[in-house]
Image (tube, rainbow, N blue to C red):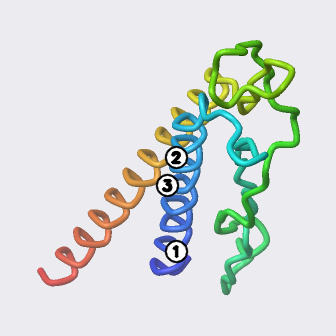
Amino acid sequence: MSDLKLFEIIAGGLKTNRLRIEVAASNLANIRASEKNGKVYRRKIPIVRTEPVSFDEQLEKNLKKPEVSQIVEDQRPPLLVYDPSHPDAGPDGYVRYPNINMMEELVDFLTSSRAYELNLNAWTVSRDLILKTLEMGNK
């Protein structure tokens, strides 16, 4: 396997997980955003897919670079809270909030953070191994 391809796969993991962290943080930041101008914030969901990375060996079929192919909006209906005194309450007294589950977002945030950390460790170890190999070749 080419070292550059290895770093391409790891970089794809770093980029993908950074975006997943950003989306989870955005969802958490908008958890109590009430309806504005007839629109309520909808939870964003990153769709992760893998992109083939070409190799010269048989590994070509098994290793793929991850990437976020799109970010879709959750189609769950908004959460209705009865609060007629709220400035964004409708004529029925209900305020529409995003139907975001805090625990679900925290789990997404933590798993993405952990995956990012693991990719960063793989990057560091791979780099160190290549540098050690180069040092051995110069002796």
Q: Amino acid at mark 3?
A: Arg
Q: Nearer the viewer, residue 123 or 96?
A: 96
In the picture, measured across the screen, residue 123 lies left or right of residue 9, that is: left
Q: Which residue is mark 1?
A: 8
Residue at disc 3, secondary structure = helix
Q: Nearer the viewer, mark 2 or mark 1?
A: 2
Residue 70 located left or right of residue 76: left
- Circle number at residue 34: none
Badge 2: how crowded within 10 Å, few (<14), some, or many (20+)?
many
Instruction: Check disc 3: other Cα within 10 Å, few if <14, some if 14-19, many if 20+.
Output: some
Q: Is residue 120 left or right of residue 94?
A: left
Q: CA distance from mark 2 to mark 1?
A: 20 Å
Q: Could you tell me how far apart the alpha carbons at marks 1 and 3 are, in whole angstroms? A: 15 Å
Q: Which mark is residue 21?
A: 2
Place of residue 51 in the rendered image (x, y in percent of width and height, measured from the top left) = 73, 72
Q: Residue at x 32, y 58 (%)?
A: 124
First-in-chain label (1 vs 3): 1
Q: Quadrant of residue 122?
A: bottom left
Distance, label 3 to label 2, CA atoms, is 5 Å
107 shown above or below 12:
above
**In the image, what residue type sits under mark 2?**
Ile
Q: Which image quarter is the N terminus in?
A: bottom right
Near-viewer residue (16 or 104) = 104
Tell me: residue 86, above or below residue 77: above
Quick check: marks 3 and 2 in contact, CB under 8 Å?
yes
Q: Which residue is at a point 23% across and 68% down the rendered structure image?
A: 132
The residue beneath circle 3 is 18
Q: Amino acid at mark 1?
A: Glu
Which quarter of the figure has residue 137?
Answer: bottom left
